[in-house]
Structures are given as C-alpha cells and as structure tokens.
Amino acid sequence: MVDISPVSPRRARLEKDLEHDLEEEGLLVEAARIVLHVKGVSGMTVRDVLAQANLGTRAFYRHFRVQGRAGVAMFTRAAAEEAERLKQRMAPATDPRAAVIAWIDGRLDLAFDRRIAANLQYLSTEAQLRRRETPAELSLRLT
C-alpha cells in the first residue's frame, strides 16, 4: 500500500535543509579539487577553498569539523566517480570475459586518456606524496 499522507512541514523543512547541506558540501569538495589542482596539498588552504566556493568559514566547519576531512571527502568522491565510470564502461559487456577486458581498458584510460587522467592522476600523485602523513599532519597543511 502506498502512503499518500501529506509530508509534515517539519519533515519538509528537514528535507530541504538536507538537500541544501548536500549541495553546499558538493560546492566545497569541488572547490577543494580545483584548489588542489592549482596549488597542490602543500599550497592549499581553507581560505583558498572558501574563496573558490564563494562560501564562509561557518559553511566549511559545518561540513568538515577537521580540515583534513575535506581532503578525505574529495578523495572519496573521486573514487566513487571513478567506480561509476568503470561500471558504465563494463555495462555493455555480454559475458565475464568482455567485462574484464572493458575494466582493463577503463583502467588504462587513466594512463592514456588525458581527459580522464587529469583529475584522478593528480589526486593519486598527491596521495602518494602524502601517504605517510597522519590526518593531523595533513590538517596542519590545510590551515
């Protein structure tokens, strides 16, 4: 049975707030990606991210209580986008062998297709450079 009762005003407001929060967080993560690409981790600051997103300090700390979490969100989003890209690449496969070939071709795109490699390759390089840093050390770099 389908529930056709109206949504309470409180629930509607909460859903609207959640939608706004997700949109705002997306702006911050995308701004962080742009700043990272231009300045690298060592040159990236919260101030730069906020300027790129055209948002205030409160917005940043509402979503990321610790600066290093913005970086984690950025890497997580990039990984999810890459997983979706590979999934779409494999979708037309008619058997497991074709799916594996499509997956390998998709992974090779990272090395040979500049459009695809641009975002992920840079994030990967930065991650490798910073892999021994603790979250606290990374947070210090972002202040």
Image: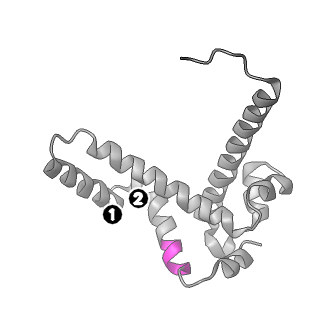
The crowd level at tag 2 (other Cα within 10 Å; few <14, some 14-19, many 20+) is: some
Three-letter amino acid code at disc 2?
A: Ala
Name the residue carrying label 2: 117
Q: Is residue 139 above or below residue 26?
A: below
Three-letter amino acid code at disc 1?
A: Ala
The crowd level at tag 1 (other Cα within 10 Å; few <14, some 14-19, many 20+) is: few
Q: In the image, residue 60 lies at what x, y percent?
A: 78, 56
The span from disc 2 to disc 1 (Cα, nearest Å) is: 6 Å
> Which mark is on residue 111?
1
Residue 115 seen in this snapshot = no
Instruction: Tell me: 53 left or right of 90.
Output: right
- Is 127 part of what is drawn in magenta? yes
At a point 52% along the width and 73% down the height, the residue shown is 127
At a point 56% along the width and 79% down the height, the residue shown is 130
Instruction: Tell me: 142 left or right of 122.
Output: right
> Which mark is on residue 71?
none
Q: In this view, does 63 lie above or below 93?
A: below
- Tell me the quarter of the picture where residue 36 sits: bottom right
Residue 89 seen in this snapshot = yes
Q: In this picture, which residue range is highlighted in magenta?
A: 125-130
Instruction: Tell me: 6 left or right of 91.
Output: right
Q: In the image, residue 143 lies at what x, y percent?
A: 77, 72
User: Nearest the camera: 125 or 136?
Assistant: 136
N-terminal-most mark, 2 or 1:
1
At a point 58% along the width and 62% down the height, the residue shown is 37
- Tell me the quarter of the picture where residue 107 sits: bottom left
Tag 2–tag 1 contact (CB < 8 Å): yes
